[in-house]
């Protein structure tokens, strides 16, 4: 009788440990794995956001160095060139990254650029300056499955921009970066009466 009780208690322990393993697998698959993927996705997005900030900085430097007001085509090219680290795959030697950068620069639905004069300032009486704002929106693709569907669906509810709406429909996330440039303003002609 003692032997039978001992045998049944060992069998019950094995069943309990098997049930714990099944519970852990279900919890890991439904909760911990999507949470881990979300951490990876947000880490990639923060790197992409930093690369976008650098690209905007590089484009602002190019705009500042331009003798006349820079055009959107030049800004697009500088942005795409500076975004190469985000587009590069180490296995192809950069050829595909250059092609992706050229394609990104040519698509206004993936890269929206606004370059406008915001206000005039005077540092001294002899030099009037204009403040120019460069705002860039980049439609960044999401990669991990649960995040790819959930985050755009949630953010789409409060979107007001056509560019953001298009990004969310593409299961992507719009990243925004801004920079400001002080440029000498065009001399204004004085009217003599």
Image (cartoon, rainbow, N blue to C red):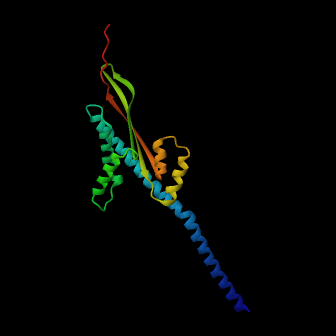
In front of the other: 161 or 127: 161
Q: How many marks?
A: 0
In front of the other: 3 or 44: 44
Check the picture and name the quadrant holding the C terminus. Answer: top left
Q: Is residue 4 above or below residue 82?
A: below
Classify residue 187 as left or right of residue 174. left
Q: Position of residue 41 (x, y in %)?
A: 46, 56
In front of the other: 2 or 101: 101
Q: Position of residue 112 (x, y in %)?
A: 40, 42
In front of the other: 77 or 41: 77
Question: Which residue does the image show at 35% across and 45% down from the upper left?
Answer: 54
Check the picture and name the quadrant holding the N terminus. Answer: bottom right
Q: Is residue 56 above or below residue 95?
A: above
Q: Specify whether residue 108 is in view.
A: yes
Q: Position of residue 176 (x, y in %)?
A: 43, 43
Q: Position of residue 77 (x, y in %)?
A: 30, 44
* Residue at the top extreme, as displayed: 193
**Residue 53 falls in image quadrant:** top left
Q: Is residue 164 above or below residue 97?
A: above
Classify residue 177 as left or right of residue 3. left
* Residue at the right extreme, as displayed: 1
Q: Specify whether residue 94 is in view.
A: no
Question: Which residue does the image show at 61% across and 74% down from the upper left?
Answer: 20
Question: Which residue does the image show at 31% across and 60% down from the upper left?
Answer: 90
Question: Which residue does the image show at 30% across and 62% down from the upper left?
Answer: 91
């Amino acid at each position: 009788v003692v032997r039978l009780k001992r045998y049944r208690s060992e069998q019950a322990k094995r069943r309990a440990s098997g049930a714990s393993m099944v519970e852990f697998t279900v919890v890991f698959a439904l909760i911990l794995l999507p949470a881990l993927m979300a951490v990876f996705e947000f880490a990639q997005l923060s790197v992409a956001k930093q690369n976008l900030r650098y690209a905007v900085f590089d484009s602002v430097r190019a705009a500042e160095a331009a003798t006349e007001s820079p055009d959107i085509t030049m800004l697009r090219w500088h942005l795409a060139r500076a975004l190469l680290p985000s587009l590069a795959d180490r296995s192809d030697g950069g050829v595909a990254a250059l092609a992706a950068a050229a394609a990104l620069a040519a698509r206004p639905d993936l890269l929206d650029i606004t370059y406008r004069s915001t206000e005039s300032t005077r540092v001294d009486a002899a030099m009037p300056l204009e403040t120019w704002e460069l705002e860039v929106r980049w439609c960044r693709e999401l990669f991990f499955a649960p995040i790819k569907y959930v985050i755009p669906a949630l953010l789409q509810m409060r979107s007001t921009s056509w560019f953001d709406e298009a990004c969310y429909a593409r299961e992507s996330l719009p990243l925004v970066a801004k920079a400001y440039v002080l440029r000498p303003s065009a001399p204004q002609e004085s009217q003599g009466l």
